[in-house]
Image: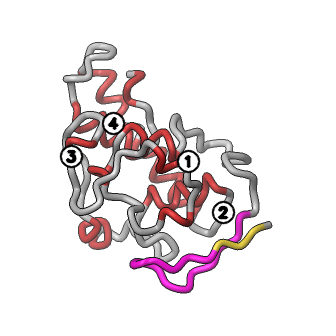
Amino acid sequence: MKKVYVDDCMQKDYVYILSEGVGENFASEFQPDLCPQEMLLLGIFGGKYLNDCQGEFPKIWFTAAKLSPQVKDVTLNYFSVDASQSLGEWRRKGWIHPQDPRGWFQWYCRYYMGRRSEDDVRQIKRWKAFSRHAGAVRKYCEKYDFSCRRKQRQALLHWAYDSRMI
């Protein structure tokens, strides 16, 4: 087991334990299509995610990641659309757990690295619920028509569903 110490602009003096191997031993009902590195490479959240806490994760994740150092740039998103709500809106809706103040993707990155926590069940339930958007894309779009429902496709990428396969 390895301890990870976090001290960034959104989280001070937070420590967690990696109890599983990287990318291993996921809950049986949690089978994302994409790993965090693939998501960052494709372009998610307008490139404005994990910018000040890259030291917590493998450097390789950021080698070719589409990141924006200053402000969100939706042209960096795979589908070049804004498919995100603000962090303030996430907080207002009660989606943020204190251990992961940046939200679901931060939880997923830490889960992928091997952290297991009391919030796993809730986050996996949220991930499963998000799959309804894939159903809408399948229902209303021709297969591989990336011009159809681009915002939903981008949002699916934010949740580790590979909407390029729909």
Q: Amino acid at mark 3?
A: Val
Q: Which residue is mark 4?
A: 133
Magenta segment main secondary structure: strand
Number of the label disc, if any, that sits on residue 75: none
Which comes sooner in the sequence, label 1 or label 4?
1
Query: Nearer the observer, disc 1 or disc 4?
Result: 1
Helix, strand or loop at label 4? It is helix
Helix, strand or loop at label 2? It is loop
Q: Is residue 165 left or right of residue 25?
A: left
> Percent x, y for residue 152?
27, 37
Q: Amino acid at mark 4?
A: His
Number of the label disc, if any, that sits on residue 60: 1
Quadrant of the rendering where the C terminus is positioned: top left
Q: Nearer the viewer, residue 1 or 99?
A: 1
Marks 4 and 3: in contact by CB < 8 Å? no
Q: Is residue 135 left or right of residue 140?
A: right
> Percent x, y for residue 44?
34, 46
Vertical placement of residue 127 versus 49, above or below: above
The residue furthest front is: 63
Which comes sooner in the sequence, label 3 or label 4?
3
> Percent x, y for residue 150?
22, 32
Helix, strand or loop at label 3? It is helix
Q: Which residue is mark 3?
A: 74
Marks 4 and 2: in contact by CB < 8 Å? no
Query: Nearer the observer, disc 3 or disc 4?
Result: 3
Q: Name the residue: 31% across, 57% down.
A: 48
Question: Magenta segment, which residues?
Answer: 5-18
Which comes sooner in the sequence, label 2 or label 4?
2
